[in-house]
Image: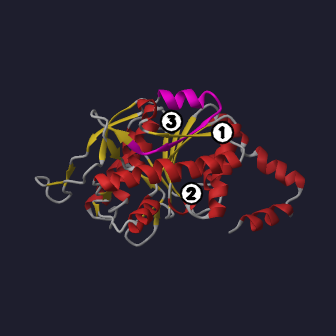
């Protein structure tokens, strides 16, 4: 669906009905006013121009009605493209990118230089004031080398190179920007005690940031309609126990593993609602936050 169809659809709505539709958002605006909403931005919503514009508009609208959106972005396909241009092949173990020193350089310039600044530009174009950060800025994300244990053999460890495990998150730079009408856009790169860089899974960063910011919501935009069971049906509501079962029987695997694990951690640590939503739906963020229409999968700790 392109923007043009969106506009034509709304011209047929009578002004009074439009007002009614807008008024229906009031309870949600009131409920979430002043609250922090962490958004993991990834998938098609990041690459399709119409969806990019929708996303930027949604973020600006949320900011202007008094919420505090914080964007954490991924960039898997863009990193993959850059590596291909250099003749390097991307390798993954259990959903995590194996990151040698050369790959780390590529990750830093693609995420912090290209992808992040594109998102900042989109939000600014939609009338917001976005500021790009990496985990280095303001000493935000301290990390150490990830020790990855094999999922089927706990005695075996995989070396995934400069992939980081978060040691601590200092949200003060994000808070300072939030309080001053800015929208932070964060690249998932951390630093170690010897100033070395670490590539950190963006889902994990978003979940941890939501926890330390005591966010009201964590929303993860993906390329699927939510978490699906083995027969492809959408699971709208997941508890910790059900997630453990889905891990065990292999329903949740690959790139979905860190996403769900992070989401569950956030839910257990006090983030009120965690949603995995379909970023291919135009204005998915507004639909999820300002209407009672449930999209995707909600994750609860109990």
Q: Provide the residue span drawn in magenta.
A: 172-189
Q: Position of residue 11 (x, y in %)?
A: 85, 62
Q: Which residue is disc 3 drawn over?
A: 215
Would residue 291 be visible to someone looking at this image? no
Q: Position of residue 179 (x, y in %)?
A: 60, 27
Q: Residue furthest right?
A: 15
Query: In what quadrant of the picture does the C terminus appear?
Result: top left
Q: Is residue 199 above or below residue 63?
A: below
- For mark 3, give the secondary structure: loop
Q: Nearer the viewer, mark 1 or mark 3?
A: 1
Q: Which residue is disc 1 drawn over?
A: 129
Mark-to-mark CA distance, 1 and 3: 20 Å
Mark-to-mark CA distance, 2 and 3: 19 Å
Residue density around tag 2, few if under 14, some if 14–19, many if 20 or more, within 10 Å: many
181 in magenta? yes
Residue density around tag 3, few if under 14, some if 14–19, many if 20 or more, within 10 Å: many
Q: Nearer the viewer, mark 2 or mark 3?
A: 3
Return the residue nearer the eye: 121 or 230. Answer: 121
Q: Nearer the viewer, mark 1 or mark 2?
A: 1
Query: In what quadrant of the picture does the N terminus appear?
Result: bottom right
Q: Residue at x 46, y 38 (%)?
A: 210
The circle drawn on residue 244 is none
Instruction: Report the side of 230 relative to 236 (left or right).
Output: left
Q: Which residue is disc 2 drawn over?
A: 295
Instruction: Report the side of 137 relative to 248 (left or right).
Output: right
Would residue 79 be visible to someone looking at this image? yes
For residue 102, what is the image quadrant?
bottom left
- For mark 2, give the secondary structure: loop
Q: Is residue 224 above or below residue 19?
A: below
Residue density around tag 1, few if under 14, some if 14–19, many if 20 or more, within 10 Å: some
- For mark 1, give the secondary structure: loop
Q: Residue at x 21, y 47 (%)?
A: 147
């Amino acid at each position: 669906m392109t923007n043009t169809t969106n506009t034509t659809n709304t011209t047929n709505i009578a002004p009074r009905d439009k007002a009614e539709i807008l008024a229906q958002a009031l309870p949600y605006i009131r409920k979430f006013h002043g609250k922090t909403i962490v958004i993991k931005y990834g998938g098609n919503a990041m690459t399709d121009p119409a969806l990019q514009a929708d996303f930027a508009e949604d973020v600006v609208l949320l900011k202007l009605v008094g919420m505090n959106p914080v964007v954490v972005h991924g960039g898997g396909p863009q990193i993959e493209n850059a590596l291909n241009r250099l003749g390097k092949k991307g390798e993954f173990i259990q959903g995590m990118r194996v990151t040698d020193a050369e790959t780390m350089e590529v990750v830093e310039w693609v995420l912090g230089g290209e992808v992040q600044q594109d998102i900042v530009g989109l939000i600014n174009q939609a009338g917001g004031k976005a500021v790009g950060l990496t985990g280095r800025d303001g000493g935000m994300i301290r990390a150490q080398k990830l020790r990855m244990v094999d999922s089927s053999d706990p005695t075996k460890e995989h070396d995934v190179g400069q992939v980081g495990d978060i040691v601590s998150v200092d949200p003060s730079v994000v808070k300072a920007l939030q309080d001053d009408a800015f929208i932070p856009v964060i690249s998932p790169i951390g630093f170690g005690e010897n100033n070395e860089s670490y590539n950190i899974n963006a889902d994990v960063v978003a979940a941890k940031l939501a926890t330390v910011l005591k966010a009201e919501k964590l929303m993860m935009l993906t390329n699927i309609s939510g978490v699906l069971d083995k027969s492809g049906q959408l699971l709208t509501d997941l508890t910790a126990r059900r997630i453990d079962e889905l891990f065990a029987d292999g329903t949740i695997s690959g790139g979905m593993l860190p996403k769900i694990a992070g989401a569950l951690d956030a839910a257990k640590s006090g983030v009120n609602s965690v949603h995995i939503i379909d970023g291919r739906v135009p204005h998915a963020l507004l639909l999820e936050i300002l209407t009672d229409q449930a999209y995707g999968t909600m994750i609860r700790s109990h």
